[in-house]
Amino acid sequence: MDRRAFLSGSAALGAVLAMPGLAETQEISLPPQPSRYPDDAWVVLDPRFSQYMIGNTPLQRQWTGALWAEGPAWNGVGRYAVFSDIPNNRQMRWDAVTETVTPLRHVSNFSNGNTFDFEGRQISCEHSTARVVRYGREGSPTVLAETFEGKPLNAPNDAVVHPDDGGVIFTDPGYGSHWYYEGNVRELELPTSIYHIDATSGVLTKLTDEIFKPNGLCFSPDYRILYVADSAATHHPEPARIIAWDVEENGRKLTNRREFATLESGFHDGLRADVDGNVWAATGFAGEGQDGVQVYAPDGTKIGQIKTPEGCANLTFVGEQRNRLFMTASQSIYTIYTAAQGAHIA
């Protein structure tokens, strides 16, 4: 190498080294300090829960930015979960591939619960309009229910769909009518009830009003039992419970009402069943160490918990195998892999 080439190369190297940050050792950005396995989010209360616990998986905070996250539902075709941020009047979309959250709908009429029917159409319970709507292929909503016996519904909360005829069962506790924060302020004109929408005729039938504040709901794996969270404690001198009914006529009739579980503090909101018939119940306002997800065996025994740093409003199983629990917890979204498998798609 001649002198001119050497000097030219030295000058170029000097210029590079003079650039801010490049002459120094680069700092690598690391994620937050990991928790030691097994993650202390897992709580085994009964040996039956041990088979659903995975010892080498963490509770992951996927996103934060909501005021009150609610109503998650899994779309297997799109590989995303939709959820509601009620006070911000929007629906959000969590992408399972990129694990990012983006807006889906704004304005959402302060929607709460969401689900997908067996044709892949999204069904949403709206607070401010007191309606149950279904989004078609074009993305526009069709109203499925908004009045009963000439009176407006209270504020539909959560919904499930029966596979045999596509009938929709939804709860109507009225939370979206108590304050403007989550809808509108208005007097409830109807008893807090559970309803059925006939998929063919559109006829709305009241199934029962033997429940104080019907909230989240789910079917058993065989669709023969309907579980409904009664968050009575928010407005009544009653403890929060999970009520169970036998399902008849594809959901057009509920019989044999019984108390499945009773809470000592806080209340359950969203519910999901796994393939073994266990009920996974989102839990909030119970305090540190109790908020998160409480899991009940089919006989009603509480067998385990997954603790979250924030109160948990709702949950669903996501992923190709439906083995990842997706939790809408106050201001944030959390996930954790489990050895359980969700019984139903949405």
Image (spheres, rainbow, N blue to C red):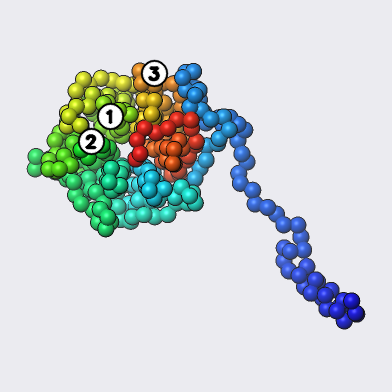
Amino acid carrying mark 2 in the image: Asp
Q: Report the residue marked by disc 1.
A: 223
Q: Is residue 173 visible?
A: no
Question: Picture coordinates of residue 160 (x, y %)?
Answer: 27, 37
N-term-proximal mark, 1 vs 3: 1
Residues marked 1 and 3 touching at CB (< 8 Å): no
Q: Report the residue marked by disc 3.
A: 301
Question: Picture coordinates of residue 342 (x, y %)?
Answer: 39, 33
| Badge nearest the viewer, 3 or 2 | 2
Outermost residue, front direction? 164
Pick the front one: 55 or 15? 55
Q: Residues within 10 Å of mark 3 (few under 14, many from 20)?
A: some
Measure the C-alpha gap from mark 1 to mark 3. 20 Å
Measure the C-alpha gap from mark 3 to mark 2. 30 Å
In this rendering, the answer to whether 210 lies above or below 100 is: above
Which residue is drawn at the image coordinates 17% and 29% (left, top)? 249
Measure the C-alpha gap from mark 2 to mark 1. 10 Å
Q: Report the residue marked by disc 2.
A: 164
Which residue is drawn at the image coordinates 46% and 19% (left, top)? 48
Outermost residue, left direction? 150
Pick the front one: 142 or 250? 250
